[in-house]
Image (cartoon, rainbow, N blue to C red):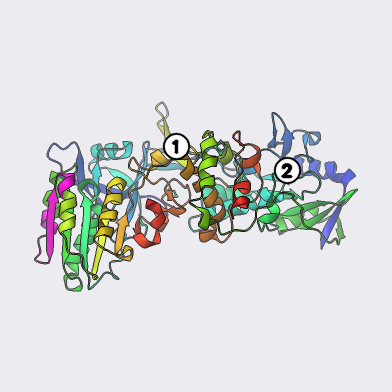
Amino acid sequence: MTYEYADLKIIKKEANGKLASIFSLRYKGAAHPGQYISIWVPGIGQETFPIAHQDSTGFNILVTKKSDVSKNIFPLKKGLILVKGPFGHGFPMNNLKKTNLVMIGQTHLFSPLWFALSYVKENKTSYLKTSIVALQTKPKKAFIENLKKASSDKNINLEYTEKAEDFKKLIKKIKFTKNTNVLLSLKEEYLKEVLSLLKSKKVQNKNIYFYLHRKMNCAQGICGSCAVLGEKTCVDGPVFRFDDVLGFFE
Amino acid sequence: MGKLLKKEDLNKFLYKIKTKQELVAPVETDAVRFETVKFISQIILDKIPEFPPKKYFLPSNDEMFQFRGSKILGTKKQPSRIIFGIRQCDVNAINVLDKVFLGKNPDPLYKERREKTTLIAIKCSKEIEKNCFCTSMNLSNFADLYFHDIGDSFFIEVGSDKGLKLVSRLKDYEYQTGPINTKKRLFKKDIARYYNNKAWKDAANKCISCGICTNVCPTCLCYKQKEFSDTKTDIGTKKRSWVSCQHKNFWEDTDENAMDFDKTKMLKHRVYHKLSYFKKNYRIGMCTGCGRCITQCPAKIDFVKIINKFK
Ligand code: SF4
Ligand code: SF4
Ligand code: FES
């Protein structure tokens, strides 16, 4: 699959406008929660972004000014950039129907969960209760506003905090039943902690799905830069079921 | 059915090829390596090349394409060439690269290079390196032509139409070829059971992260992409270059938050990728038993010995 031109528009900016923005990307292609796209800014390089939302005109992605590519997306505003995708294995939303969902994520890495959440809302009758626990890392404002909007439903409960300690407390408070599936999108250091927390709450590994935020390069399973214990994040993931990849965190 | 070529006619055969296209073969420079042949007399067939011919399909610093603004200007045309004197391990290594680069998303540059290359292999007989263990690796005959030394002649097995074209005028010949006999063997074991064995840590402690093992490996293919712009012409170039999983920054580059990678994990990543992970996806092993990573490791790390000792 080759890169195609897409329109890019900032739809929401962090208050100071410097840290992060949510961009809407006019680009065809049907995506699934947990998938990602690859963006190429000519002269700078390519980077992958998890898809945060999809509607009839295209996708939304959350861009934080971190890498050379993301920094250079900001001045492009309405400009044309090159996009390919969507790629990867996402959350198996169909198999999770008729269960309770718990989504745990950090703000700057929340995109995949955000997409999963809109999916749940669109298919409301198919899912039981959804609980969201978010750790507010930068960007805070643009993210929380959108998350509140996205979780405005009687079957969805949102809790968020800025403190790592409280974050764990919020997770501990949740009642995990046998019929609960957990979706995670966190930095790897938090991921490890949350996984052991879930173990102590007796959540089975087969009920835990996580989005692995690895930097990708070719996004085609060729270059090897995203490999973890033989699994290539770009094609075998980026969403993994925990019991399939227990070795990742040994 | 095969063909017969008298040894005294080999130079004539190669010279004819060389007049039509680039001929690459093992040549002795600072080391024995695959290079473009200027004079047939340079070709060395009694030593195993210290470097594989991987660079002809995946150069260490490879120009992928040029662009102006967002417009892709195209890739450089690739030359057609014949690689002569390539061994069974390196031929099979190309089979491994094919699985990745010609798989679901064929890489156009690699594809063109492969289509324009003819592989003439030569079977190892006496001059086997002490660290070769290809007989343990289930290799297949994969070359366009396969030369077997049978005394004063070569028996040539024909592997493709491309190969047949080169030898169609030679005499038909029948010959029963035998296996290669390496002294070194890699014992078949379920290595997953030994992932946490202390031997890995002991070996990794000696590793100086030089990356030679991945550099000389005919199947190590990991690369990073980079872009370069020429401000005068406004033309950008996208390049890819080899990276080594035995360098810490390989892992640091994947994510600032990536799980800590120490030398033990890096060594295990290399060995398990070669012997097990790749097989899971492509049904063939990634290691072809060339032994270069063992011979050329300054710390004398020998994964075959490590595995063979597991009880
Ligand atoms: S060649 Fe040896 S010392 Fe160098 S990185 Fe490889 S294993 Fe380590
Ligand atoms: S891992 Fe070592 S022995 Fe195997 S193909 Fe690579 S260099 Fe050769
Ligand atoms: S990004 Fe290249 S293999 Fe995954």
- Is B283 on the left-hand or right-hand side of B159? left
Quadrant housing the C terminus of chain B: bottom right
- Is B3 on the left-hand or right-hand side of A108? right
Q: Can residue B110 be seen in this view?
A: yes
**Number of the label disc, if any, that sits on residue B130:** 2
What's the distance in space between the residues labelled 1 and 2, CA to CA?
30 Å
Whether the magenta-drawn stretch holds residue A153 is answered as yes
Q: Mark 1 lies on which chain?
A: B
- Residue drawn at (70%, 45%) of the image: B82
Residue B129 screen position, x and y as percent: 73, 43
Q: Can residue B59 be seen in this view?
A: no
Secondary element at tag 2 = loop
Residue A58 screen position, x and y as percent: 25, 56
Considering depth in this image, is B78 or B7 the residue closer to the camera? Answer: B7
What amino acid type is highlighted by mark number 1?
A: Lys
Residue B261 screen position, x and y as percent: 42, 42
Q: Mark 2 lies on which chain?
A: B
Quadrant housing the N terminus of chain B: bottom right
- Residue drawn at (68%, 38%) of the image: B50
Considering depth in this image, is A160 or B85 the residue closer to the camera? Answer: A160
Is label 2 within 8 A of ligand 2 (CB to nearest ligand atom)? no
Considering depth in this image, is A73 or A201 the residue closer to the camera? Answer: A201
- Residue where numbered disc 1 is placed: B248
Q: Give the range drawn in magenta.
A: A148-166
The local crowd at label 2, few if under 14, some if 14 to 19, many if 20 or more residues have their Cα within 10 Å, is: few
